[in-house]
Amino acid sequence: MSSPSPRGSVEGWLASAHPSPVTARSEWGSAARLALIPLGSRFEAVRLPEGIVHGAAGSDALSIVSDRLAQYLCGGPVIHDPGFRRYYALVPPGTAQAWLAPVAECLGEDTYLGVPRADRTEPDEQTLASYWVVPMARPGRLCKAADVLALVMRGDSSADEDES
């Protein structure tokens, strides 16, 4: 018997955060390849403005941003929504209750996030659809809140320097 593919096991874990995992899988099978997943049970997400992320990375070049996010967040998963110019770092449940960085909101319970299918790892210039800028390496592997906060502080101080 073969073991499940990494994509399949990651998608299974993400789908398990949905009240109907079958619905999440169906949404990934649609043209948008995006499932609306409720936050709070399996994971939450810190919404990072593009300027903060690019400031922390010292670049707006996608390959550099991707590499720096992976480095600064120790490979933790990050979604990029180019249409709204935001990044979403997936963090453990409960993070929103203690989150104190006003320039980057932590989204928790009573919030849904558009989560791309696990294989959507490249930007689509025509649709500006969300994709994994740092894919989830394995089920349950999330960013540490402290690493995300350090990234926010780095990006915020870089933005302050640019304004002076």
Image: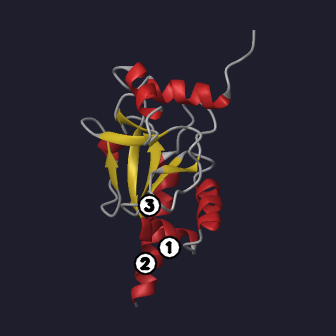
Quadrant in which the C terminus appears:
bottom left
Residue in the picture at 38% in, 24% down: 23
Task: Please indicate whether residue 101 sits to the left or right of residue 159 in the image.
Answer: left
Say which label, 3 or 1, has the lower sequence index.
1
Foreground disc of the pair 2, 3 = 3
The residue identified by callout 1 is 55
Residue in the picture at 45% in, 85% down: 162
The residue identified by callout 3 is 82
Label 2 residue SS: helix
Please say if 66 is above or below 136.
Answer: below
Q: Residues within 10 Å of mark 3 (few under 14, many from 20)?
A: some
Q: Which mark is residue 81?
A: none
Residue in the picture at 59% in, 40% down: 119
What separation in Å lies between label 1 and label 2 (alpha carbons)?
Answer: 6 Å
Q: Are marks 1 and 2 in contact (CB under 8 Å)?
A: yes
What separation in Å lies between label 3 and label 1 (alpha carbons)?
Answer: 16 Å
Q: Quadrant of residue 92?
A: top left
Q: Residues within 10 Å of mark 2 (few under 14, many from 20)?
A: some
Label 1 residue SS: helix
The type of residue carrying mark 3 is Pro
The residue identified by callout 2 is 159
Which of 23 and 59 lies nearest the eye of the viewer? 23
Q: Position of residue 19 (x, y in %)?
A: 33, 21
Which of 149 and 54 lies nearest the eye of the viewer? 54
Say which label, 1 or 2, has the lower sequence index.
1
Say which label, 2 or 3, has the lower sequence index.
3
Q: Residues within 10 Å of mark 1 (few under 14, many from 20)?
A: many
The mark tally for this picture is: 3
The type of residue carrying mark 1 is Gly
- Single out the residue that lies furthest toward the left: 110
Please say if 17 is above or below 132.
Answer: above
- Single out the residue that lies furthest toward the right: 1
